[in-house]
Image (tube, rainbow, N blue to C red):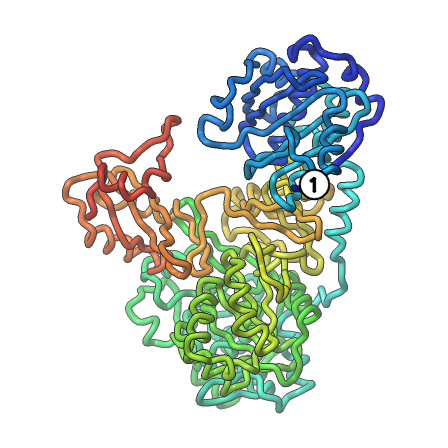
Amino acid sequence: MARAVARLDRDTLTGLERPAPDMLSGTHALTVAVAAVAFHYAAFVPDVRLLVAAGDDGAKDFVVELGIDPALSFAAHAERIAAGLRPHDGAADAEGSDGGPVHRLTIGARVAEAAEEARAEGEAGTHEVTAPGVLRLDLDPVDGLVVARSAAASDPACAALVEVFTELLGRARREPHRAVGDCPVLSAAGRRRLAEFNATDHDFPAETTLHQIFRDQARATPDRTAVLTDDTSLTYAEVDERSDRFAAVLRRRFGAGPGDVIGVLAERSPDLPVVLLGVLKAGCAYLPLDPHAPALRIQDMVRRAGARAVVGPDRLTEGLGLPVDVLPPDPPEALDGPLPVPPALGTAGDAAYVIYTSGSTGRPKGVVVEHRSVVNRLNWMQRAYPLGSDDTLIQKTPVIFDVSVWELFWWMFAGSRVYLPPPGAERFPLALAEAVERHRVTVMHFVPSMLNVFLAEAERGGLGDRLDPLHHVFSSGESLSAQAVDSFHRVLGGPNGTRLVNLYGPTETTVDVTSFDCPPEAAHGRVPIGRPIDNTRLHVMRHGQPLPVGVFGTLHVAGSGVARGYLGDEELTRRRFVPEHGRPDTRMYDTGDIARWLPTGDIDFLGRQDHQIKIRGIRVDLQEIEQVLLEAPGVVDCAVRLDEPGPALAVLRAAVTGSDGLTRAGLRAYVTERLPAYMVPATYDRFAELPRTSSGKTDRRALAEDAAVQARGQRL
C-alpha cells in the first residue's frame, strides 16, 4: 500500500482542534472543501465524491459530491458542501453513480495516528484502502498529522494528495474567498524540485544553421561516405557540391531566398538529401509533400504555404495541377556546365522547414520550425547518444513526418552516413533486417505499433543475428507498451545489447522533447516518456497553475525547441503558444497531452485531452476527418472513432446520419479525394440520429459498442 505523511503547522490547525457538532460548521466545512479540491487535483477528476468520516471515533459518516469550479472560492465550495451534505447510506454510496471511485476523508483525533500504528503493526482494519483508484486522506486536527493512502504498491498520487492538501489548507484559511483556480498548489519544496527537473541548460551552437554544420563536416571529411543506397553512394564532398549547385538553381530560376518556402515532393533517393540541403543553402524552408496524398490536399498545402516552387520528378508532379512552377530534383544546369555558386544564405533564426499536421478545422496546420530549434535537438541527441564515423543511420520515415528530421540530418553532426532504403521497404521486417546486416545499420527508429510487428517477425524468423549491428533503437509517435519493452529486450536487448529509447514530442516542439532509456528489467504499467532534453522546460498545468509531482495535468513545453508557430494563422498560434509560466517574455506550447511528473523526474504520459489520436505514429485529429465528411453530399451529422482490435492494428470507423442514398463507396471516394489514405475511415455506419449523452454530446462510448451499433445503425 502506498502512503504519504505530513504534519500541519499550528496556525493552520487553529479552530480545527475543537470537535465539530456537525460537518456544517464553517471551519470544518472549509477543510472538507479544501480536501475535495485536493482530491480533484490528485485523483484527476472534475467531480469529487467523498465518503467523509468525522468525529473522534470517525462514526459520523457523510457523503460529499462536489463539482470543482476553479472560478469559485474555497468558501463558496464550502457553502455548496454544507447545502448538499447527506448521511452515508452504506452500500448505496460504495461507488459513484457513474461507477467512478468514492474517495475517503477521515477527520478526527488520533485517526491518522491510529492508521500509522495499524500499518506499523501489520493490521489492516478500517484504515486500509483496498479498491483500486481510491485515495484515502486521514487528518488529525489535534496534532496535525496528515496521512494519505492508496491500494497501489507505489502511487505518486498519495504524496501529491498530501502536498496539495497541506498547501491549500493554509492558503484557504488565510484567503477563504480566493478562487480555487487562482491559488497556487505547489509548495516551496515542490517548486525547487521542479526547478531541478527542468535544469536542462546546455551549450549548443545556437547561431549556426543545419547547412553550415553539414558544410563544416564536408570540409573536415570530404571523402567519407555520406549517403548510401543499395545501388550507389555519395561522399560528403559530392553532396556538398551538388547541394550548392541546386541552391544556385533555386536562386537564379525563382529568385528564392530567406523567408521563402520550397515544396519537396519526393520519395527516398540519393537526390533527397541533396535537394533538402540545397533548399536550406538557398536560405529557404522546405515543405515536405506526400506523393500519395490527394491532389487537392497537395494543392491546398502549396497554396497556403505560399511556396515559391515545388521540387519533384515528373512522374510524381504530372497531373497534380500545382499552382506554382515545378523543378526536377536533378535540373540539367545543376549537373554540369558553369554555374556560379554564391555563399549559403540563412541564419539560425530562419525557418528550416514547414510541416503540416492534422487540424480540427478540417484543414491541416503548417508548423514553422527554425534552424536554431533543430540544431539544439540534434546537438542533444549527439551528446546523449553519440554517433561515430563508423555509424550508419537508416532513414525510413516519410519526410512529411517530423521524425524524419533527425533521420535526415543527425548523421552529419558526426561524420556518419545515412542509408536510404527503397521506397516501401520500411514496411517489411525481413527487408529491414537484410539492410541492417548488409549496410551495418546501427541506429533505427520505429513507431511502437511497427516495432511490435518487427519484433514478432524477428523472433519468429530468427533474425537476431542479422540485427547484431544495431546499437540503438528509438521509438516515438505512440505510447510504448511495457509488453513491447519486454519483447525488445528478449529479442534484441539481451542477445545483442541493443538499447531501446522512448522519445516523445509534438511537431510544434521540434520532434522530441523527452527521452527515456528503457531498462532491461521487466517493465510494468505505463512506460515513462522520460526527462526533458537539453534547453527544454516542461510544465504540467491545470487551471493555469503548475502542478506538483504525481498530479496529472496538461503538458506544456518551453525552451529552444518551441516552434515559431502556425504558418499564416496568428490566432491559433496565440492560443496554443502561450506565455511561459514564470517567464512571461518566453513562450510555451500547450500540447493538449495529459501527463504528470514522477518522483524520478520522468514524465508519465496518460493520453490526449481532445480528439487527436495516433495512427502508426501519425498524429490525426478526428475532427478534421469529421469536417470533411460533413461536407460530403447527403451527410447531416457524423462522428469518427478509432478502433484498435489488435496491438498493431488501428481502424477508423465513421458513423453518419443523412439521406438514404449514402453509400460506403460514395463516402469513401469523397474522403479519399481530400485526405491521405491513413485518414480514410474503413467502415461507415448510417444512423437515423447519432446516440447522445445526457448532456447532448455525441455518445462516442455507445458508438464503440457493437451491440449498440447493430441495434441503431446500418453498415453501409
Please say if 174 is above or below 297: above
Local SS, label 1: loop
Residue 440 in the image: state x and y as whole percent: 55, 85
Q: Is residue 466 left or right of residue 413?
A: left
Residue lying farthest to the right in this orientation: 10
Please say if 317 is above or below 662: below
Given residues 651 and 671, the one toward you in this image is: 651
Residue 628: tell me if it is visible.
Answer: yes
The structure residue drawn at horizontal position 25% and vertical position 38%, both measured from the top left corner, is 636
Which residue type does callout 1 highlight?
Pro
Given residues 712 and 544, the one toward you in this image is: 712
Residue 618 in the image: state x and y as whole percent: 45, 58
Please say if 136 is above or below 218: above
Q: Which residue is mark 1?
A: 548
Given residues 231 and 356, the one toward you in this image is: 231
The structure residue drawn at horizontal position 64% and vertical position 68%, both measured from the top left corner, is 378
Number of numbered tags placed on the structure image:
1
Residue 480 in the image: state x and y as whole percent: 52, 59
The structure residue drawn at horizontal position 47% and vertical position 69%, both measured from the top left corner, is 397
Image quadrant holding the N terminus, namely: top right
Neighbour tally class for label 1: few under 14, some 14-19, many 20 plus, Cα within 10 Å: many
Residue 244: tell me if it is visible.
Answer: no
Please say if 420 is above or below 224: above
